[in-house]
Amino acid sequence: MRSRLFPITDDHIHFDPVNGRGVEAAKDFLHAGGTHIFLVAKPSWSLGIEPVSGDDYAKVFDETLRIAGLIRETGLVVFPILGVHPAEIGHLKERMPLEKSVEVMKGGLDCAAGYIRDGRAVALKSGRPHYEVSPEVWAASNEVLAHGLELAAGYKCAIQIHAESGPCADVADMARSAGMQIDHVVKHYGSPETPLHPSLIAKHEAVPVLAREHRSFTMESDFMDENSRPGAVTGPKSVPRITKKLLEAGVISEEDCWRIHGETPEKVYGVRISL
Ligand SMILES: [Zn+2]
């Protein structure tokens, strides 16, 4: 890798060489100054996989690890995050009863935990629907999320949560009852008021404020890498681009960059971030 003064880490990004630009998009991140990514497994349906058991998620996770391998060849450091997208419940319950859907999703999380144990992934991903659902689906989703939190506590790993916007204070309570420290529970697409660790979308208006206050947060693009939805998301360069803009404007210092992109993700995920 070319010499860098500080790391630039994207806390939640996807690359998809089949439906998107794959390694070429990862190179955009690299050339914009990016150094480290947390590569999050895509939902099963976006890869054309229809799980009927928890073990079927291995196909999704193996594909994520294959992509991680391709991206590492560019010189980027890749930390895989594996789990079950909360919206899987809507797809599963069209093919099986709700109770069975819960079982499959919990099994998918068990499967992901196996990759954590083997050191092939660094964190789990779970959550609950961020859109309106029936009380039954809500309760079922919380049951899956509670299982994810218990696994993360047991394997002593971080977990990314994809949930409704807002603080999600009850998720902090669920995490504590599962025996987890809440600073290892990452709120994807987070906002400053959450008691969980916030991963803020790079263009979030609170980023400069939190940086100045030395609050603990990370930055993400949530780039989806889908050619069919080019305008639906921010691009792969957004985290490096906005970080450099804030640095040039004097809003943050190089020391702040080390804290946001190095020390903070190191503490949250228990990984090593160096240049
Ligand atoms: Zn995402």
Image (cartoon, rainbow, N blue to C red):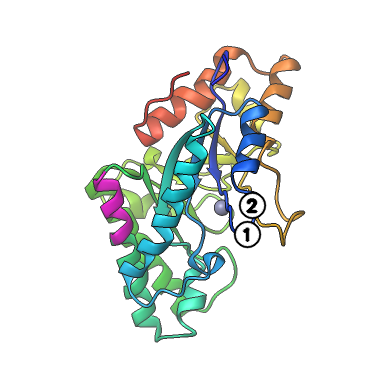
Rendering quarter of residue 99: bottom left
Q: Name the residue under label 2.
A: 225
Q: Mark 1 points at which residue?
A: 19
Asked if 12 appears above or below 29 in the picture, the reply is below
Indicate the position of residue 238 as horizontal and vertical percent values.
69, 36
Front one among 65 and 6: 65
> Can residue 164 be spotted in the picture?
yes
Residue beneath the point at 49% across and 43% down: 70
Front one among 131 and 221: 221
Type of residue at label 1?
Asn
Question: Magenta region, mostly helix, strand or loop?
Answer: helix
Does the segment drawn in magenta span residue 116? yes
Indicate the position of residue 235 as horizontal and vertical percent values.
70, 43
Give the structural element (helix, strand or loop) at label 1. loop
- Mark 2 and ligand 1: say if the CB distance to the nearest ligand atom is below 8 Å: no
Type of residue at label 2?
Asp
- Work out whether mark 1 precedes mark 2 in sequence or the reverse, and give the earlier one: 1
Does the segment drawn in magenta span residue 236? no
Residue beneath the point at 62% across and 53% down: 224
Indicate the position of residue 50 as horizontal and vertical percent values.
46, 75
The magenta stretch is 111-118
Q: Which mark is residue 235?
A: none
The residue carrying pointer 1 sits among few (fewer than 14), some (14 to 19) or many (20 or more) residues within 10 Å by Cα, namely some
Give the structural element (helix, strand or loop) at label 2. loop
Using the numbered discs, state the Cα–Cα distance from disc 1 to disc 2 in whole angstroms.
7 Å
> Can residue 83 be spotted in the picture?
no
From the image, state whether disc 1 or disc 2 is nearer to you.
Answer: 1
Indicate the position of residue 220 as horizontal and vertical percent values.
59, 40
Pointers 1 and 2 in contact (CB under 8 A)? Answer: yes
